[in-house]
Image (cartoon, rainbow, N blue to C red):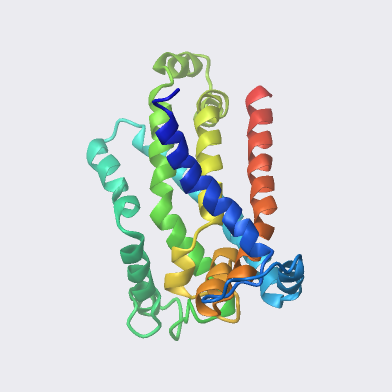
Amino acid sequence: MGLLAPTVLILLGLVLYPFFYAIWLAFSDKAVGSAGRYVGFRNFAYVIAWPQFSAAVFNTVIFTFSAVALKFVLGMSVALVLNQRIRGRNFFRAFLLLPWVMPAFVVYLVWRWLYDPLSGLINYALIDLGLVASPIAFLSDRSTAMPSVVVAHVWRNFPFYAISFLAGMQTISQELYDSAQVDGASRAQQFRYITLPGLYQIIGVVLLLTTIQTANAFEPVYLLTGGGPSDATMVYTMLVYVMGMVNLRLGEAAAVSTLFLPLLVGLVLAVTVLLHRKANA
């Protein structure tokens, strides 16, 4: 026990102290350079009444669910393809990790250039193919800003899903598929009754971790849109940044984080319960 004490103290200092300090900030009138004083629930009342907060809640939910769903579908599809005996399979497996291992800063700056209405490759291709008559301002239009951010985020992070699912598929006995094929089961039936049940544990862990990570995503919004246009991509992490680092209102920024904590916990519990029911069905 004595040997574990230093490690436990370090973990408590790195996790519990910032957590409780953030909660204390949420109940104080704390600005950069001031000592701060207790103000009760005033910060919470101010934040809830602020229009940007409701926009951040809505955008965070939309961003999280759409991104997680797309990463799941794309990751599962790629894993199914790479689980087959195809030429160059090992090369494609290694190449798949490229978006995920690249620094987020580099990835999203490249996507920002791709979306550029004047010099971006996407607009150039769309116009050259005759699909659009004029360039599309992907990141400056309210109707396309959020989908554009989601696409960039999904492209960078879906390899984690694919590699995780592929690793799980490798543990499923080939004899199960051979027996199912002899019994006349189609590919879709094999996927539904063999592959999916064999991946439930991995799916649960992946969805749990990535739902938290996606809900707390900051880099794609900050580097692509900065929360705009007109708060169309203002997720809660961006709102915390604006309040705390731009407006220097630490108490209100901490209040936003504290208000989102029950939402994130509820989201995690919902995913956990859903997957638990699926696994026991």
Rendered location of residue 151, percent (x, y): 47, 62
Rendered location of residue 279, percent (x, y): 63, 26
Rendered location of residue 160, percent (x, y): 40, 44
Q: Relative to residue 79, is residue 106 depicted above or below?
A: below
Rendered location of residue 272, percent (x, y): 64, 36
Quadrant the C terminus occupies = top right
Count of numbered labels shown in the rendering: 0
In screen coordinates, is 277 left or right of 199? right
Q: Relative to residue 161, is residue 138 depicted above or below?
A: below
Is residue 82 visible from the viewing direction of this image? yes
**114 or 177, which is in the foreground?**
114
Residue at screen point 38% across, 73% down:
112
Q: Quadrant of residue 78?
A: top left
**23 or 50, which is in the foreground?**
23
Residue at screen point 73% across, 74% down:
46
Residue at screen point 50% across, 62% down:
150
**76 or 188, which is in the foreground?**
76
Is residue 125 visible from the viewing direction of this image? no
Q: Quadrant of residue 234?
A: bottom right
In screen coordinates, is 41 left or right of 210? right
Quadrant the N terminus occupies = top left
Residue at screen point 63% across, 33% down:
275
Q: Quadrant of residue 120?
A: bottom left
**190 or 113, which is in the foreground?**
113
Q: Relative to residue 249, is residue 211 depicted above or below?
A: above
